[in-house]
Amino acid sequence: MSTARDVAAPSVELYDTTLRDGAQRADISYSIEDRLRILHKLDQVGYPFVEGGWPGANPRDTEFFKLATKETLTHAQLTAFGMTRRSGERPEDSQVLRDLLDAGTEVVCLVGKSWDLHVTEALRTDLDEGIAMVRDSVVFLRAQGRRVFFDAEHFFDGYVANAGFAMAVLAAAEEAGAERLVLCDTNGGMLPFDVARVVREVKAQASVPLGIHVHNDAGCAVANSLIAIDAGVYQVQGTINGYGERTGNADLVPITADLVLKMGVADVLPVGAVEHLTELAHYVAEVANLAPDSHQPYAGRFAFTHKAGLHTSGVARISKAYEHIDPEAVGNHRGVVASDYGGGATVRMKAAEYGLELPADAVGRVVEDVKDRESKGYAFDVADASLEILMRRAAGWTQPFFEIESYRVHVEQRTGDEEPLAEATVKVWTKGTRHIESAEGQGPVGALDNALRKALVNEYPELIHMSLEDYRVRVLDQSVGTGAVVRVLLDTSNGEREWTTVGVSENILEASWEALVDAYTFGLLHPRESAEN
Ligand SMILES: [Zn+2]
């Protein structure tokens, strides 16, 4: 069992449910190992409560708690989630409550129904029994020495429909010993005005701290969380990157940053922790096996990237006039988009962002080269990594990592419904050694990626961390040459950062190969900073 932390209570309490409610997202499936990694990351950054799952709901959750409760945590307290006893059942006979206790956490989050419609229609019992289910379950868990946070499911809809019943459920939980009354907008349809009004009314009647747990179905999850805090809520529940069922939960990344940087609630996380938000957002995306949202507030790779010539020269002079916060405050960085309209000023600024000092003649060459290539279909405004490589070359650099001798791919269309299988062979040189490697893959790019990695990974173990995240092909119009021109964009990640490379050719394989070689070059040029392997 985890132990209580001996620290002063913060003025707002963060409660993460990435591993429980966040895992409800349709395309997420965490292994137990994934969950442990996310738990440790949240602990490391300093989140005080991390809900690990619903013990008993499936074997994976149960197994996770067996392992997780043995882990040593510095900041986070692991909590378990579960439901009240059933209608007509004694709490001591409830398997759900038994599983919750068996999880072995000091804090449990108990969910109960607070919308009369759900009690009468879903549970098919009467309202008195609905209240008793909550009361008995909290009393039982308290008697077993657990601290109880009570999640009032569908609270806002319930309050609108039958405020008397919704409040009676909260009162029962409070009397029975619940330490938090968490108001849930389970359907996610509330607007900030409604949330603020209801929170104020509830706060006038409740004596224990309130919490807020909202979903994003009306696009208001972050706003609803913040306005609830403003209206007097103490605990805010959410998930990293807003992962969750349907449109997701409230995103703790902007919520945390807003609290610390804008609402003056600096003590929600340990000192300095907010600078790790960008890294945390990317880390969780990587473990979840999802491409990070490039436009996520605060943490997105384009969250502080400016486009437009006039504007970008303004940013260089006085960033405060164009940015709501200093990107470094959340561990992100400023970027500018280079495009043919930006000219020399944008190129110099972009070079400074990369830490390059370009001689004046090189700036001129970059401007010409970018213009020329963009007219052929290259898109350097998105392919930042290819742009950096182009700039370095303009200043006389050649990549020292590998030399390509040749590559080839063939695609095998097999009988039946099976996916076509591609097989690639690459011949490359590293420091005087010739490597010939073949690999299979789903599609030619996957096969080339696998073969190139195989050929280089012994020399460059860093490549183990690199993976292709996304591959986009666009057929451009035929105005340029004779055939249709294809542009390939590749997103690559090493778990710490992502970058995009571009290739353009009339031949899709050539375009892909160009983008792939840039992706590897950039990855080797900027290896991971962390020592973790
Ligand atoms: Zn939820």
Image: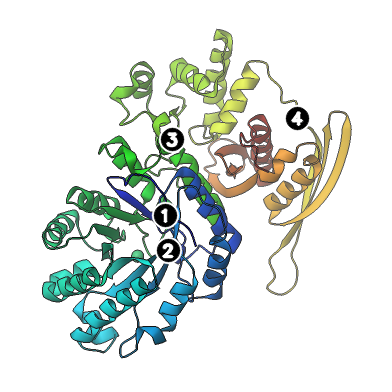
Indicate which disc residue 21 carries: none
Q: Give the x, y percent position of residue 512.
A: 65, 43
| Mark 4 or mark 3: whose residue is earlier in sequence | 3
| Mark 1 or mark 3: whose residue is earlier in sequence | 1
Residue drawn where x is 63% and y is 15% of the image:
395
Q: Which residue is mark 1?
A: 4
Residue 393 lies in what quarter of the image? top right
- Seen from this angle, which residue lies furthest right? 433
Neighbours of disc 1 within 10 Å: few (<14), some (14-19), many (20+) = few
Q: Nearer the viewer, residue 107 or 274?
A: 107
Q: How far apart, in angstroms, are the residues tagged by discs 4 and 3?
A: 33 Å
| Residue kind at label 4, given as amino acid type | Phe
| Mark 4 or mark 1: whose residue is earlier in sequence | 1
Q: Which residue is mark 4?
A: 401
Q: Quadrant of ligand 1?
A: bottom left
| Residue kind at label 1, given as amino acid type | Ala
| Mark 2 or mark 1: whose residue is earlier in sequence | 1
| Residue kind at label 3, given as amino acid type | Glu
Q: Nearer the viewer, residue 363 or 273?
A: 273
Disc 1 or disc 3, which is closer to the eye?
A: 1
Q: Quadrant of the C terminus?
A: top right
Indicate which disc residue 106 carries: 2
